[in-house]
Amino acid sequence: MSDPFDLCNPTPEHLMLRELVADFTAREVEPQAEAQDRKQELNLPLFRTLGELGLLGITVPEEWGGAGMDATAAVIVHHELSKSDPGFCLAYLAHAMLFVNNFFHCSTDEQRRRYLEPVLSGEQVGCMGMTEPGHGTDVLGMTTTARRAGDRYILNGTKTYITNGPEAQLALVYAKLDGRVTAFVVDRSCPGFSSSQPIHKMGMRASTMSELIFEECEVPVANLLGEEGSGMVHMMRNLELERLTLAAMSLGIADRCLEIMVRHAKERVAFGQPINRFGQIQRYIGDSYAMTEATRALVYKVALAVGPEQNNRLGSDAAKLFAAPVGKQVADHCMQVMGGAGYCTEFPVERLLRDAKLLEIGGGTLESHQKNITKDLTRHFA
């Protein structure tokens, strides 16, 4: 009889990847997580170690220096890193998914030769500029503009809440060219490109965030990604992987908080017995386990049907819509079980609870997922 299919580790390579990232997370990520949260800084030396491990190009083909793996592999990395430091993982996501993966699938060979090597090694940090001060989910309402001027495009506008903004040497930026969304690679050498001071956040503090500012910013024509007006196509394609990996981050938070909760409830004694003997504590643990397992099944199932040539907006929206509240709910249950101890910074639960909230907002709000799912199902059953 053959072994049953492992949804979370469908191949030996996926299992090896999980073991690699889990070991790295326990040895290198966990010890620095609390300090980086307090400092509200990205740990750049640790970030570059991700490049040495080959994780910054997890979805880039091997012939271009990447790991040549799939959406399940990307989910595994985000899942494992987020058990210790979701903020650090968010910086990884903004670089490896929002910049590297997106860039690779809409760039030319010449552009790849120019830009891939330093971002795959971690020498340069990447980010993506989509959200604006007046436009988040309403992408088509963006007001950043581009115009052609000889061998340059001139960009004007501001992007905000951009993860990795303060450190990024490269930004994949969306702007309207003749009213059509168009994508560009903008690097720090482009005149007129700057970033604001870091924007301080409630959670995910081990990653940084800022505005990207374009004031008559000169971008070479060679930095146009795809064709003029084609930005929406690859933006939507990349959003599927972004939402799936954000869902995986929530799963990582839930896994860690469930483990802490169970251990604490076994060791903590009240009225002469472990608190896991009390029905209310059992409810927190039981409900948290069920939610976490349901999230695991959905996220990894959807991962099998997401790829550069495989659109699955319905699945990725459903995965993030369901998963995002689970990390927050399980973290909240964990804090309730731990009582005052959970509320203190001595334990990671208060940090994980703060981190979890962003997953209901970033990469598409819960409301945007509900809208997308309704539209797609209406079309399906028409």
Image (tube, rainbow, N blue to C red):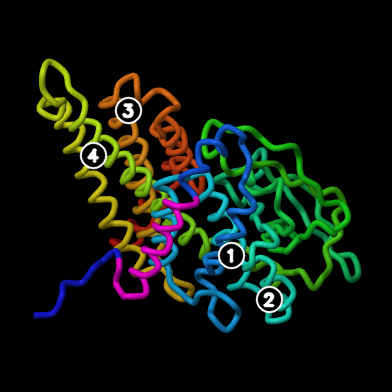
Above or below: residue 74 compared with residue 372: below
Q: Which of the labelled discs sits on residue 112, or is there none?
A: 2
The residue that mark 4 highlights is 288
Residue found 22% across the figure and 37% down from its top? 262
Instruction: Locate residue 224, reporting x and y percent.
Output: 74, 69
In space, the residues marked 3 and 4 are separated at their CA atoms by: 12 Å
In space, the residues marked 1 and 4 are separated at their CA atoms by: 34 Å
Between residue 264 and residue 71, name the one nearer to us.
Answer: 264
**SS at mark 4 in the image:** helix
Residue found 33% across the figure and 63% down from its top? 302
Q: State which quadrant residue 305 falls in.
A: bottom left
The residue that mark 1 highlights is 51
Disc 3 residue type (three-letter): Met
Above or below: residue 192 compared with residue 151: above
Between residue 101 and residue 365, name the one nearer to us.
Answer: 101
* Left or right: 263, with 71 as reference point: left
* Left or right: 3, with 185 as reference point: left
Q: Rate crowding at label 3 as few (under 14), some (14 to 19) or many (20 or more) other CA atoms within 10 Å.
A: many
* Left or right: 275, with 196 as reference point: left
**Magenta: main secondary structure:** helix
In space, the residues marked 3 and 2 are separated at their CA atoms by: 46 Å
